[in-house]
Image: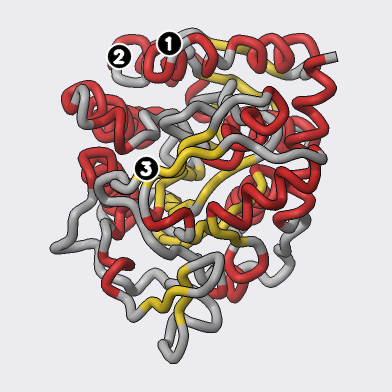
Amino acid sequence: MSLILVTGSAGLIGSETVRFFADKGLEIVGIDNDMRAKFFGEEASTKWNRHRLETEISGYTHTDADIRDETAMQSLFSRYGKSISAVVHNAAQPSHDWAASDPFMDFTVNANGTLVLLEMTRRYCKDAVFIFTSTNKVYGDLPNTLPLIELESRWELRKHSYAEHGIDENMSIDQSKHSLFGASKVAADILVQEYGRYFGLKTGVFRGGCLTGPSHSGAQLHGFLAYLAKCAVNGTPYTVFGFKGKQVRDNIHSHDLVNMYWNFFNKPRCGEVYNAGGSRYSNCSMQEAISLCEKLIGRSMQINYEANNRIGDHIWWVSDVRKFQSHYPEWSYKYNLDAIVGEMISELQERMQ
């Protein structure tokens, strides 16, 4: 038996991983204790998605456990041992706003939990591929020092080495303001690299832009595009924080990201790092995303603008994914921005019927 262990399995990237790898014929063991509901309230609970996985995926086994619990993780890893072909680690506290309210919780989930999983992998299935969902927040607010120019609906970058393709993996992660969330993810990010470089584990770090898709339980503090689509469909007011709503995000569909994971799983490397976002292929400002949602629902949204931005927020982020493409030339995008938002709104409208 060969199986994939997926943390955060009922979340956006976790559930996409379950479905994608199950479609390839692999058995899946999921770990998810719905901490998202604790972080963001019941509206962000992933119970609905867990139920879908358990009823729709025949080779899926769910485990309600905390990745920080060494005893629970040791029991799980020792049970399956060398039959574990990969650990796809998505579980996290994902909001830099929330992190400031409980730094201990944020750090133990993001950093300590990652350490527990890495050590269990080293002890019980050292030949398994370890894939980590990191974040562009490891770069802190250093991208805000780029020579950005203000256009009518967005901030943009011109006449710079990052202008054509986006920001690559050589940008420093040092000496900038990260938010406490960014700091805890830096710790986890470096740990995953180190277990690859020091112990020789097959580890890959994927520094995501805005990760999105119809399985995202969007909340005000996390998942801007999913939450924006939810507000558009439900008629709920949406608040934009800072930068006149012209801040730019690249958006990658969960399918496209997990397809990256699949390619890495089949040809793994040790301690590798990739920027993994929508790149120049799929990006938008807040204003542009709002306009797209309004076009799709056929009415105006109620938008409120707050002058103050969130601490550590990026003004402009576009990922350069050419490093990954050079290592895995068979990978390509399936979803552009219009397809991403259109799919989310259609699914939300179906759920309301």
Decide which of 187, 337 is in the foreground and name it. Answer: 337
* Mark 1 → mark 2, Cα distance in angstroms: 8 Å
Note whether 28 is above or below 87 in the view shown: above
Residue on which the image places disc 1: 65
Q: Which residue is mark 3?
A: 306
Q: Position of residue 345 (x, y in %)?
A: 76, 35
The amino acid type of the residue labelled 1 equals Ala
Q: Are marks 1 and 2 in contact (CB under 8 Å)?
A: yes
Whether the residues at callouts 2 and 3 have beta carbons within 8 Å, the answer is: no
Please name the residue shown 31% across and 38% down the image. 96
Q: Which residue is mark 2?
A: 69
Category of crowding for the residue at label 1, using alpha-carbon neighbours closer than 10 angstroms: few (below 14), some (14–19), many (at least 20) = some
Q: Specify the label residue 304 is tagged with.
A: none
Q: Callout 2 environment at 10 Å: few (<14), some (14 to 19), or many (20+)?
A: few
Crowd band around label 3 with a 10 angstrom C-alpha radius: few (<14), some (14–19), many (20+):
some
Question: Which element carries disc 2, helix, strand or loop?
Answer: loop
Q: Mark 3 belongs to which amino acid? A: Glu
